[in-house]
Amino acid sequence: MLLGVSSVSDLQALRDRMRAFAAERQWHSYHDPKSVILALVGEVGELAELFQWLPADSARELALDEPLRTRAGEEISDVLLYLVLLADVLGIDLAAAANAKLSEAATRYPPGINP
Amino acid sequence: MLLGVSSVSDLQALRDRMRAFAAERQWHSYHDPKSVILALVGEVGELAELFQWLPADSARELALDEPLRTRAGEEISDVLLYLVLLADVLGIDLAAAANAKLSEAATRYPPGINP
Amino acid sequence: MLLGVSSVSDLQALRDRMRAFAAERQWHSYHDPKSVILALVGEVGELAELFQWLPADSARELALDEPLRTRAGEEISDVLLYLVLLADVLGIDLAAAANAKLSEAATRYPPGINP
Amino acid sequence: MLLGVSSVSDLQALRDRMRAFAAERQWHSYHDPKSVILALVGEVGELAELFQWLPADSARELALDEPLRTRAGEEISDVLLYLVLLADVLGIDLAAAANAKLSEAATRYPPGINP
């Protein structure tokens, strides 16, 4: 017997937390698309700064150690949170859209070619 | 008997699809962090281009209509997919990191202040 | 008799050409700071795309050859033109500001430390 | 009589100062194109952060006052300096390239159309 099972995806859970976060602070009026994209750009910039001067060949390994590991996780998270917010502002189902895009990419880039 | 909430991770599902996508094309060697961040920047740029000249006040409404709605969903998805890839390359649990960051933000920005 | 250095401002010349370009098209109303920054982000994205999958060690050499050389020059130029436009919109003397910033950087980063 | 006149453009002067700056610190090995683009992205992010939550309609006016005026000038300068460095690393004459791009844009976008 299956009782009271609700299935919540992690992207939807993040969206719901972002909604509550914005509602508690009455920040809705700030969240027009252009502003949210600029905020996203700010976080992408912080992510880039973490890696900019690292040797390309060892950047991955260096990021397995602290403090870079935690810092990278924070900045990637900030980008994700603004992306989730932007999708919500625009009424886009992020998981569905990303899966559709990946299916399309699989068709457009057949195995055997370079990126 | 199963009671309660079952959680579906669309972020893990996207990560797994990205892993399979890269493996089928043997693209692993391209996916050092600096390259993936630059690819992410490229997609953020395409997202910005969709909105750059729209009036800030009506951008949200304009994006509810086609073709902008679909285009925005595609570019947001591209950013998400590179973000999922980057987290995977760095061994970061994206959902856990984003939830932790959001909890920290809730502490840092108490309700009542502006962003 | 004229002795010494005469200075030619290509930044002012570009600013004047951008002003004339915008005036002929009556594009002033589009050029609020947030829109121009998003346009700049779009061009930075195109620049990043040119280099994203190149091996870091040979990217410089690869960009000495066509067609990458011309493409890189075009995208760098697009970024510069929006930067010149943004400075003009904000009433900032770009050459003076950049020279001041460089003088400050010289103080902040004494020779002998890493970036 | 004209003696010893050398004409130095402001973009060339910035390039020469950046060269000297890098040489004094022995930073040449850091300045591969992908690293410099990531550094540029970092500065674009800081620029975006200054404006992200400002109302689009009053952002320009707000940036005429301090402290935003100085902060904006600093971040625009940082973007410019990395752009000058990138062009130099790639052997691109930035003023010539930007003027060529602007001439091309004038052809591509005849007066009377929107951006």
Image (tube, coloured by chain):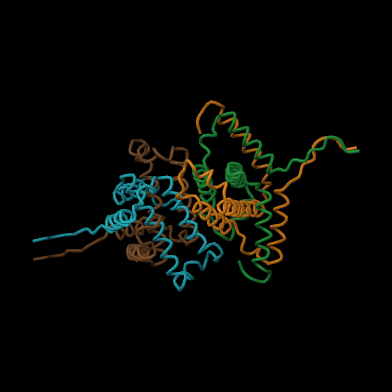
Chain colours: A green, B orange, C cyan, D brown
Q: Toward the viewer: B10 or B75?
A: B75
Side of D28 relative to C84 (left or right): right
Based on the displayed image, in which of its 4 quarters is residue C12 positioned?
A: bottom left
* Residue A107 rendering spot, x and y as whole percentages: 67, 65
Q: Residue at x 38, y 66 (%)?
A: D92
Furthest residue toward bottom: C66
Q: Nearer the viewer, residue A37 or C24?
A: C24
The picture places residue C57, in percent across and down from the top left corner, at: 52, 66
Residue drawn at x 11%, y 60% as measured from the top left: C2
A80 relative to A107, above or below: above
Q: Residue furthest top?
A: B112
Q: What is the x, y in percent for residue B63?
A: 55, 47
- Horizontal side of C65 relative to A3 (left or right) equals left
The location of residue D58, given as percent across then percent down, is: 39, 37
Q: Is residue B105 positioned above or below C70 on the image? A: above
Comparing C1 with B69, the one in front is B69
